């Protein structure tokens, strides 16, 4: 497995935003002055939409509908996107397009991550709401620590491994089962 490093900084989608087939046309739907007024004056609770994926059409559409609805209800909504930082992801499935060797060797960054991030930001950015990148919350030392921990855990122990009380191993195991299903 390659060493964990920060992903390249993908710029994401740029205006004018052209909706993809079967995705909401947010530029047209949000062109009214009501949206701009509501989005800029929202003072309710902060809500972070954190599914992390832009490539999954149904998830990205639901995230954007939730973002619009909550904003219109007064919430201060933002979204977080994976920007290539996750070693494995929801989009990757076992098969010829994303074989296990590609995932293990961080090959998703060059094959999926940029397109996924661009699709997600293309759906989200027309709303004018804040966005966050997962990599923005990591330091170089975090990658080294993750590399050290992952290489020290026996595969049989992964399902029961916890970090600071969180069942990280169970989550990793569930992700592996989903990938190979």
Image: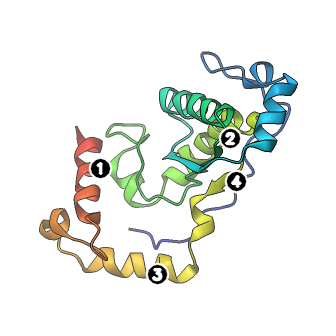
**In the image: residue 12, left or right of residue 140:** right
- Identify the residue under disc 3: 144
Numbered disc total: 4
Mark 1, secondary structure of its residue: helix
Q: Are marks 4 and 2 in contact (CB under 8 Å)?
A: no
- Identify the residue under disc 2: 121
Q: Residue at x 12, y 67 (%)?
A: 156
Q: Are marks 2 and 1 in contact (CB under 8 Å)?
A: no
Q: Are marks 2 and 3 in contact (CB under 8 Å)?
A: no
Please state which of the two labelled residues, at mark 4 or mark 2, is closer to the viewer.
2
Q: CA distance from mark 2 to mark 1?
A: 24 Å
Decide: few, some or many residues near mark 2? Use Cα within 10 Å; few <14, some 14-19, many ≥20: many
Q: Residue at x 63, y 66 (%)?
A: 136
Decide: few, some or many residues near mark 1? Use Cα within 10 Å; few <14, some 14-19, many ≥20: some
Mark 2, secondary structure of its residue: helix
Mark 3, secondary structure of its residue: helix
Which of disc 1 and disc 3 is earlier in sequence?
3
Q: Residue at x 62, y 57 (%)?
A: 133
Is residue 127 or residue 94 the one in the foreground?
127
């Amino acid at each position: 497995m390659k060493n964990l490093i920060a992903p390249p900084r993908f710029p994401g989608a740029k205006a004018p935003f052209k909706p993809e087939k079967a995705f909401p046309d947010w530029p047209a739907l949000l062109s009214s002055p009501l949206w701009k007024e509501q989005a800029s004056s929202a003072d309710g609770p902060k809500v972070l939409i954190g599914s992390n994926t832009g490539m999954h059409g149904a998830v990205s559409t639901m995230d954007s509908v939730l973002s619009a609805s909550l904003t219109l209800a007064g919430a201060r909504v933002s979204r977080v996107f994976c920007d290539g930082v996750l070693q494995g992801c929801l989009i990757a499935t076992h098969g010829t397009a994303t074989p296990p060797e590609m995932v293990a060797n961080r090959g998703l960054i060059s094959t999926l991550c940029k397109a996924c991030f661009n699709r997600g930001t293309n759906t989200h950015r027309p709303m004018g709401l804040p966005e966050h990148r997962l990599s923005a919350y990591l330091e170089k030392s975090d990658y080294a620590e993750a590399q050290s921990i992952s290489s020290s855990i026996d595969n049989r122990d992964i399902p029961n491994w916890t970090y600071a009380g969180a069942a990280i191993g169970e989550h990793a195991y569930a992700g592996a089962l989903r990938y190979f299903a």
